[in-house]
Amino acid sequence: MSADLPLIALILATLTVSAMVALFVIKVWRHRRAKAAAFRSAVYIGALGEIVSRLTLPAHDRTEWAEDPAFRETLVDFLGFVDGAERDLLVDLAHRVGLVDQFHAELVGSSREGVRLRASASLAEIASPSSRSDLRTALSDASAEVRISAAAGLSILGDERDVPAVLAALEGEDRWAAERMADSLVRFGAAAVQTLSNHVLIAGPALIPVPNHLPIVVRVLGLIGDARAETALLSALSADDAWLRIRAAAALGHPWGQRVTRALLKRLVDEDWRVRAQAATALGRHNDRSTLDALSRALRDESWWVRQNAAASMGDIEGGVDALFEMLDDDDPFAVDAALAQLMSSGYLDDAATDPERTRLLQQLGRPYLLEPGAG
């Protein structure tokens, strides 16, 4: 056995050296390949820059460019920095060299998720109407990432006819994917409002249990901020489901009128503190003096978040600072603390020493030091 040891050692040494040589060769090859790709990318950047500056396509279609991954990546990146006529020209170039057709083929025909994802993202960046059909098909792709990317592409195109398809796809997603897909619905903007509003009303906020996607749709309507969504959001605000009411209260922070303001005031006494907290914040954005009494009462709420949100909203409403100072004389110590915290954080105590009544209140609270300059 001992006689075989030198032979074994020689074999191991040979294998080790061979492995090291192979690794070195691979490393050199990868380095040269990356260097070559970087060089080609630089050439393509120069070519695309020339095309954009002259607003003229090459005399001959460079179909061979489409076969080079470096060109594909460079063109897609370039599209993120141009707009108007320059962007239209580069999109036309992508069509002429056959790049768009390649992306279409990869999106619908590749079995590799990464390839389909890159194709959908590229088609989204190119944002060509010819991509609509494939992007809509990709909404049912096996990969959630591809579905989300397809929804993003359709939102960039901005055709309101695609909103129902994206909404239908969102309904079948889990919470994580649905929240991401909702960003695409926000990007549709006003074009999505009617479809989403009708969906909220037809779905029926009284349903038990509420579909998981419905609060997300309500959030989207709030982010878009179109007054046409008012009826749907008010319906959601009166839903039996607490999470739906929470999202609706947050979404109604737009001063659309007294109907919305009155509905939010009712939710200041909602059984769920999270709804009360969101309603208090939303009322601050309405800047309506008539809400100050209700917000003052909310300073006595059992929930810290409701008290703090109500105080912050009072500070944003005309006349609210005076109301906060009045609350310093309240019998509820939690209301006093909420009012005082807001006055301190907002710098409203700086001039308190010039007002005898405010001076009295601070002295009564045992905090005369807050009258010193800069103490607030």
Image (cartoon, rainbow, N blue to C red):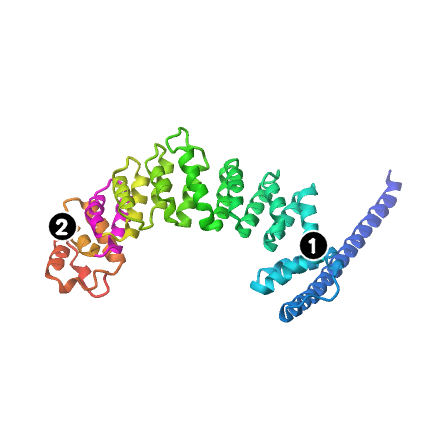
Answer yes or no: is residue 186 visible: no
Query: Which residue is the site of mark 2?
Result: 329
- Circle 2 — which element? loop
Mark 2: which amino acid? Asp
Give residue 281's position: percent from left, percent from top. Answer: 30, 48
- Circle 1 — which element? helix
Answer yes or no: is residue 6 visible: yes
Which stretch did the figure color magenta? 289-318
Quadrant where the image shows the N terminus: top right
157 magenta-colored: no
Residue drawn at (10%, 61%) of the image: 356
Mark number for residue 99?
A: 1
Mark 1: which amino acid? Leu
Between discs 1 and 2, the one toward the N terminus:
1
**In the displayed structure image, the side of residue 26 where residue 374 appears, left or right:** left
* Mark 1, other Cα within 10 Å: few <14 / some 14–19 / many ≥20: many
Say if 179 sits above or below 60 in the image.
above
Camera-side mark, 1 or 2 = 1
Quadrant where the image shows the C terminus: bottom left
